[in-house]
Amino acid sequence: MSKTGQDNSITLKSPEQISVMHEANQIVAGVLSMLNREMRSGLTTLQLDRWAEEYCRDHGAEPAFKGYRGFPASLCVSINEQVVHGIPCKQTRIREGDIVSVDFGTKYKGFYGDSAMTIPVGTIPKRVQQLLLVTEEALEKGIEQVQIGNRISDISKAVQDHVEEQGFSVVRQFVGHGIGSNLHEAPEIPNYVQKKASPRLLEGMVVAIEPMVNLGKEKVRVLRDRWTVVAADGKPSAHFEHSVAVTAEGPFILSSRQDN
């Protein structure tokens, strides 16, 4: 889930806390892997939500998004031109040719996990395939910059450069975030370079990096449900996210999946 304005001071996590966050994020990874396997045309988005919550609770965690600032579901499901924060419902069915962004979070032993991916359903156009590939690659390039002494802006630049080199647009209205004993913590992780100075990465920081990339222009708008964010030009959008710890050995991807 993307940060939308909350702020507090940066917190550093101990190795023991990072270990718990790894457990929390591996439950998220299990949910996303399950949804990737089960995704097919004809499913309702509400069914995806139920499966996600059931898996989460079966593994001893709570769904982090349910009730968060009033969000009514456990899973964010955003289809095609929907960027983030799509609300599952029994009326909306997955169709052949859709791209489905699923974003899930857990709360486990007092700490949070958060990750997202975009899943193609059947055959999708070549340019949309490229959109998904480039967005996931941008996430990987951002993660490569998670090194002690680098700045948040190094992550932002890596994401923005890769996306724009391929002719796509980075969403600027929503950003990544720190994560820990709160779902959204400082610092914000923009997917584009801002003019102001950004914090340095310190050992023990944990960040949720989440490129949101539009096939068309960067502008987005929020629908009347006050949650669902869509590309203003109606063109497809992709979203990939990992929670990553800053360690002396380099980036530790807490939410890594076996199906990566």
Image: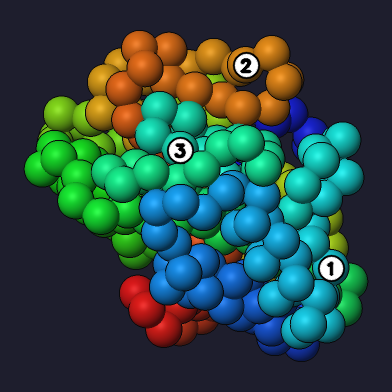
Percent position of residue 177, x then y: 63, 46
Determine the CA span between mark 1 and mark 2: 27 Å
Residue at x 69% of width, y 27% of height: 227
Q: In this rendering, would 213 be left or right of 4?
A: left
Q: List the residue tagged with mark 1.
A: 62
Q: In this rendering, would 129 be left or right of 45?
A: left
Q: List the residue tagged with mark 3.
A: 79
Percent position of residue 140, x then y: 33, 61
Closer-to-camera residue (195/27): 27
Looking at the rendered structure, the kind of residue marked 1 is: Glu
Q: List the residue tagged with mark 2.
A: 223
Give the structural element (helix, strand or loop) at label 3.
strand
Closer-to-camera residue (83/146): 83
Residue at x 70% of width, y 76% of height: 55
Comes first in the chain, label 2 or label 3: 3
Residue 156, above or below 218: below
Q: In this rendering, would 52 be left or right of 176?
A: right
